[in-house]
Amino acid sequence: MKTKSELPKDAGTPLTAWRRKSAEMSGGKSGEHIYELIDRVIEEQGSKGNVIDFGAGQGTYTQRLFLSGRFEQVIALDLLPRPSTVSDSVQWIVQDLNQPTDLPGEAFDLIVAAEVIEHLENPRALAREWFRLLRPGGSLILTTPNNESWRAIASLIFKGHFSLFLDHSYPAHITALVRKDIERILSEAGFTMISLSDTPIMVTFLFCDAYGRACSVP
């Protein structure tokens, strides 16, 4: 499988260095409970075909997608370099996720974005890129911190920001969104929401495309 491992063209700029610092600070890995929730959505949807792990980090969930045997092609995108733990059959692309990709449009059946959108600068541009990449009827699984929990709201009132967006999480977490924000942003890009589930820590959304393109609703 072809692997693109070179750094982005603007790798030497201060902005890219700042974004790489943010990516490294995030740790590149989500909790097992998040992965289990995504597993369940994939199972319920019967997802297969070509998948992108958008914001793959350390490649933990990328490898899980590959080992599931569900997907013909697994592509991972992240600003961090390819981990040695990821199968050679996975295409790993070093990519500033704030920028559009060079991947072909309407070529993917599923995009997984686990705890990614809060790290990026322009969620609307991001949503439009996700929509461009997905085939008609394709699905997006998105998780992000739950900024409507009592803990998050209390932190906003007494400390000035949501609990996972305080100074200890900066500059890794820079874009705080509530459910209504995400619904509006994805709807503007052409998606429709199929399901939502939450915990005190995170919210999981399942979207598929609208605008007359077929959606597979469980």
Image: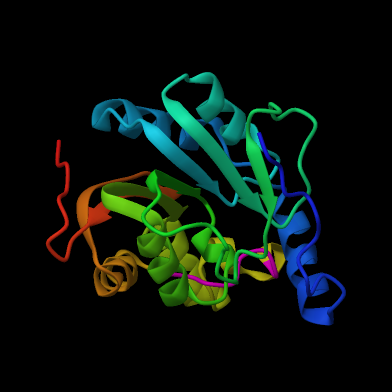
Please give left or right for residue 152 compared with residue 170 in the image.
Answer: left
- Seen at 48% across and 70% down, the residue is 176
Looking at the rendering, the stretch of residues picked out in magenta corresponds to 170-177
Residue 14 position by quadrant = bottom right
Residue 72, percent from left and from top: 46, 29
Q: How many marks?
A: 0
Q: Is residue 171 magenta?
A: yes
- Magenta stretch mostly in which secondary structure? loop
Residue 37 vs residue 88, the one in the foreground: 88
Please give left or right for residue 125 compared with residue 190 in the image.
Answer: right
Residue 31 vs residue 217, the one in the foreground: 217
Residue 211, percent from left and from top: 16, 66
Q: Is residue 150 above or below residue 84?
A: below
- Seen at 51% across and 68% down, the residue is 162
Farthest right residue in view: 12
The image quadrant where one finds the C terminus is top left
Q: How is the image coloured?
A: rainbow
Residue 201, percent from left and from top: 46, 48
Please give left or right for residue 180 compared with residue 91 in the image.
Answer: left
- Seen at 41% across and 75% down, the residue is 124
Residue 149 vs residue 214, the one in the foreground: 214
Residue 57 vs residue 86, the one in the foreground: 86
